[in-house]
């Protein structure tokens, strides 16, 4: 099967001709500063509060889980980190005669797909692209519109669906790869003979569970599966399922609060196996929860990139930009995710086309992205097909009270045999 990304590339000439005529969503392209073609979300007037009166403004939107959803402890730092990232870009000269604004159009989705779509519709005519769209099922709710308007977006999620969607600029390994690597690690390093996936429904949990199942089958270990809903009072069923199945390792894909309940209560009832949590499952606040002793005894954390305190130019720039915050790897994620959009905007400005169609055309030219050392060489290939472009390296951490974000490195970037051989041609969960 040809990848969606490759098929779209073949059709790009027709798409670009039609969209160039209507600006992606009905706006006729105009000439902006420096002779650059613009349509939505780009003005010759300066951005508010940047202090650079000689520059125009590129407006980007952010839709995140800011108040009451299950990922707010990650989402608020992600959003603040991205503001700091783009302030650094502006302080370093902006992009093509423009500053970037990621503060004017920020909306809360409450991790609800309907709300996500509603606030997206409110902002979509005012922004060039999305600096953040948090959540897999929430972003899926606006994906058809992102495609039809050619609005490039940065996900705050890692579903394997993004690898076959041209308008989505993913970074790091997807949940499917993460879980494949976790199962391979569990088999090779922990001697696991049985694996269970415990997860939320939808693109997030289903993708991780699919990767765990693929790896378990490849490695010849027993696989079981249990779906749960978010909410502390909703975990009784999966707790019973874990205790009934007694897996050696549970691949856990929930929010942090639910993880604390599941780990704490299974341990209290005698479970001795290990949990390996998919990256959004962790928050260092778990180390202060009643489940902390069980978490320290039973839990490992998989990750798509290294944590806050890592010695790399990108991590240092992040810490320098946010010197007073309490370390949280939500900040790390927000910073890493922003690099591909910066690269795409810079390439589009170089091409003299900061329209939506122009930014998407620039994305197709990116065969690598400079993550300033936060991801290894080979990350950020948006020019290749979905299989060639898939990034397959993850890491393993363990709880560590002395570490800045509550976890210490156990296994550096690695690719297990399952992910190494797997052909990414469609989302893992379909």
Image (cartoon, helix red, strand yellow):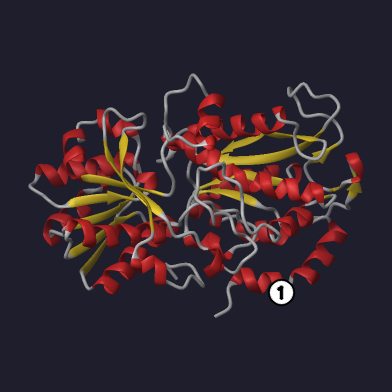
Residue furthest to the left in view is: 270
Where residue 334 sits: x, y (%)? 53, 39
The answer to whether 17 appears left or right of 379 in the picture is right
Q: Position of residue 11 (x, y in %)?
A: 73, 73
Quadrant (top left, top right, bottom left, bottom right) of the N terminus = bottom right
For the residue pair 382 and 101, the one nearer the viewer reads as 382
Report which quarter residue 94 is drawn in: top right
Rendered position, 69 above or below 162: above
Count of numbered circles in the view? 1
Q: Is residue 280 visible?
A: yes
The foreground one among 66 and 339 is 339
Which residue corresponds to mark 1?
Answer: 10
Identify which residue, 160 or 352, lies in the foreground.
352
Left or right: 206 in relation to 51: left
Q: Residue furthest top?
A: 324
Q: Residue at x 77, y 57 (%)?
A: 357
Q: Up-down: is 93 above or below 133?
A: above
Q: Residue at x 41, y 32 (%)?
A: 309
Q: Nearer the viewer, residue 234 or 187?
A: 187
In which quadrant of the rendered image does the C terminus lie? bottom left
> Is residue 66 something that shows in the picture?
no
- The 10 Å Cα crowd at callout 1, few under 14, some 14 to 19, many 20 or more, is few
Quadrant in which residue 119 is drawn: top right
Where residue 123 appears, as percent x and y from the top left, is: 69, 42
Residue 41 on image: x %, y %? 77, 42
Residue 281 as seen in the image, left or right of residue 399: right
Q: Is residue 87 left or right of residue 259?
A: right
Quadrant housing residue 243: bottom left
Q: Residue at x 42, y 42 (%)?
A: 306
């Amino acid at each position: 099967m040809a990848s969606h990304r490759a098929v779209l590339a073949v059709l790009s000439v027709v798409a670009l001709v039609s969209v160039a005529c209507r600006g992606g969503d009905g706006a006729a392209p105009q000439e902006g500063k420096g002779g650059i073609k613009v349509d939505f979300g780009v003005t010759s007037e300066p951005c508010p509060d940047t202090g650079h009166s000689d520059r125009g403004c590129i407006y980007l939107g952010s839709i995140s889980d800011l108040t009451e959803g299950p990922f707010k402890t990650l989402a608020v730092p992600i959003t603040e980190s991205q503001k700091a990232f783009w302030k650094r870009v502006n302080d370093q000269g902006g992009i093509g005669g423009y500053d970037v604004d990621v503060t004017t159009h920020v909306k809360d989705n409450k991790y609800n797909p309907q709300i996500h779509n509603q606030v997206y519709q409110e902002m979509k005519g005012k922004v060039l692209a999305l600096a953040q769209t948090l959540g897999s099922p929430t972003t899926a709710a606006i994906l058809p519109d992102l495609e039809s308007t050619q609005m490039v977006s940065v996900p705050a999620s890692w579903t394997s669906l993004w690898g076959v969607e041209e308008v989505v600029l993913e970074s790091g390994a997807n949940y499917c790869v993460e879980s494949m690597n976790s199962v391979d690690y569990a088999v090779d390093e922990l001697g696991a003979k049985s694996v269970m996936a415990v997860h939320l429904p939808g693109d997030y949990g289903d993708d991780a569970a699919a990767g765990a199942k693929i790896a378990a089958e490849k490695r010849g270990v027993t696989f079981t599966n249990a779906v749960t809903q978010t909410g502390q009072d909703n975990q009784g069923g999966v707790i019973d399922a874990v205790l009934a199945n007694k897996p050696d390792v549970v691949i856990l894909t929930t929010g942090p609060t639910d993880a604390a309940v599941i780990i704490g209560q299974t341990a209290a009832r005698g479970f001795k196996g290990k949990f390996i949590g998919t990256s959004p499952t962790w928050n260092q606040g778990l180390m202060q929860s009643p489940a902390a002793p069980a978490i320290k005894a039973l839990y490992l954390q998989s990750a798509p990139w290294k944590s806050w305190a890592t010695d790399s130019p990108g991590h240092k720039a992040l810490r320098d930009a946010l010197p007073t915050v309490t370390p949280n790897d939500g900040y790390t994620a927000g910073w890493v995710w922003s690099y591909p959009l910066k690269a795409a905007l810079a390439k589009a400005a170089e091409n003299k086309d900061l329209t939506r169609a122009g930014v998407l055309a620039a994305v197709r030219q990116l065969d690598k992205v400079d993550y300033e050392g936060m991801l290894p060489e080979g990350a950020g290939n948006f020019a290749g097909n979905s299989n060639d472009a898939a990034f397959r390296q993850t890491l393993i951490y363990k709880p560590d009270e002395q570490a800045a974000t509550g976890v210490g490195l156990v296994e550096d970037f690695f690719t297990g045999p399952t992910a190494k051989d797997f052909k990414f041609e469609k989302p893992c969960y379909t």
